[in-house]
Image (tube, rainbow, N blue to C red):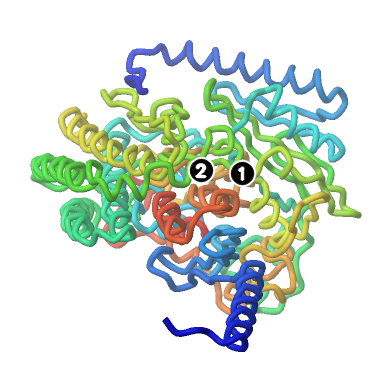
Amino acid sequence: MSHLSSTDTDEAGDAAATDELRTGLVEGLVNELQDGVVASHLLPGRDLWVRVTAEAWDAAGRVGRDVLRCSYFCYLSVIDWLPSPFGRSMDSSVDNILEHVAAKDPEPMTHGVTGGETRFQLLARLYDVERHVGVNFKADVPDDTLTMATWTKHFGGANWHEREAFEMFGITFAGHPSLRKLYLPGDFEGYPLRKDFPLLSRMVRPWPGIVDVEGMPGVADDDGGE
Amino acid sequence: MTAISERQQRAYIASQAADMRVNVELETEGMTLNIGPQHPATHGTLRIIVKLDGEQVVAADPVPGYMHRGYEKLTEVRTFPQVNSLINRIDWLGSFANEVPFILAAEQLMDVEAPPRAQWIRTLLFELSRIANVTLFLGDMAVQLGAVTPVFYAFRDREYVLNLIESATGGRFHPNFDRIGGLKDDLPKGWIAETKQVMVKVNAFCDELETLLVGNEIFNLRTRGIGVIPPEVALSYGLSGANLRSSGVDWDNRRDTPVGLVYDKLDWKVWTHPDGDSFARYWVRLQEVREAAKMVIQLCDGLPPGPIMAKVPRIIKVPAGEAWVATENPLGEMGYYVVSKGDLVPFRVKIRSASFNNISIVPWLLRGVYVPDVITILASLYFILGDIDR
């Protein structure tokens, strides 16, 4: 029914073994999805990312569950890679919005690990509770349709996560049993977690962030910190 | 005996037939019952629309969002240290535990490691928050089943633990004590001895509840075999923590991936239960409080000396990158997916809270159960509204 925690395992050996498992997971995915796997990124001893094509998203969920045996559905979400059109939130001393200064040229859109081409990327994590190894799945959402296949047929838990992604980012999931708003009232307009959706409290008030990093009285003003 | 006239007999038959028609109509017509938004069983404002056929639930649809505070959006306009005070309020009964995975993710991106003493105190406070959180569940579940006494004991003994957290951090509910690179302060004088005394009380509380409830016939009748979750369904819905372990899945982040915390240096057990019903969920949590108390005593004894803060710059800029860190919080697996672009503020933070997944199983789980069992099942799943709505 239960057993003692492993107190005397070799940590370095464990990490290497887990990395081998992760390499195996990528190979398993490439075998099943062929060209569906666009890129993968392994951070030794930490984590694994795999980016698949939008067409392969549905198959990735199935393969993740049945072939890789990652049957624990952790979460599904979206990243909006568009740099905020309201400038960087940290430039508070010259607050562009309050001063009505024309916005600076937006920074180029950059993507994180495993790269990407589109503005929105799906992000999901599956985990194997027996071998203690997980995969972060990513997929580019086509800019013109903003539609992806649903994972609800593979994981019951995807239902609510996809509803949240739908109301917060405006991504549609084809085949979802009841794609309606989860948190927001039914007549809410806009997609709040998109980078171009303004945060109203931020627009009417200067940002207090920079004040907080002033030195405390009586503390030597070096960059070292305690 | 009085003879019945033919006319009376006919009237009687007609009325019987009319009654039968009414019965037939009542049977086919369902009823919609609104549980919440304000209901003691929802610990906050969760609304559940339940369609009933007689006493049986046909369909259940939870409506969260009455307490949605948009933390994922707000983190994008807060510096990394400021985010800490926001995420304190996700699971408000075990606040310190919310801070740890986020701080660990930021440390991972910055390649900073907290000194050993800070890691031990983090683990110590983490387990204290677990005790403060789950203790309340142990009493509260009984209240929802009609036994009022245990919750008074729960509130009494939780207060001892909250006093400890307060004297160490300054905050009863929202410590905001964890820092990137270590902790805000060291522990106060005399705290260790006091903590050990309180753990004796916590153990006594667990024994008390075991005799009060676990062996109680009514409690067993109300919880055994109610709301059974098979392990494969639990995994597919992403249930975690005690909810998953009570379905027989032997997985605990503390034992299996102890990132940044010192669980691998302690002697403790992960408890599971094969039944997957409401009773199992109660029983597993009861054992977990005992294990936590055991761990706290070991942590007090083995606390290493040394600094509590690593060297970090005063203005914290987190290098560009992505990190996922999850810990075993009182309610289940809580994790943060942090995307940084090398600024003072995170670019995107995905907050994966345990209760969100734990409650998403409700439509599946409530189908076909009786109305009184709805309350039992909701209580045994144990959710905190702030943890669903974020």
Q: Quadrant of the N terminus of chain B?
A: bottom left
Three-letter amino acid code of the residue under disc 2: Gly
Three-letter amino acid code of the residue under disc 1: Tyr
Q: Which residue is mark 1?
A: A75
In which image quadrant can residue B290 be found? top left
Task: State left or right for residue B146 relative to residue B20.
Answer: left
Q: What's the mark number on residue B182?
A: none
Task: State left or right for residue B239 relative to residue B175.
Answer: right
Q: Which residue is mark 2?
A: B335
Secondary structure of the residue carrying numbered label 2: strand
Residue B4 drawn above or below residue A214: below
Callout 2 touching callout 1 (CB < 8 Å): yes
- Nearest to the observer: residue B74 or residue A155: A155
Secondary structure of the residue carrying numbered label 1: strand
Rendering coords of residue B183 (x, y %): 32, 45
Rendering coords of residue B173 (x, y %): 30, 60
Name the residue at 77% across, 51% down.
A176
Crowd tier of the residue under label 1, counting other residues whose Cα lies within 10 Å: few below 14, some 14–19, many 20 or above? many
- Nearest to the observer: residue B98 or residue A166: A166
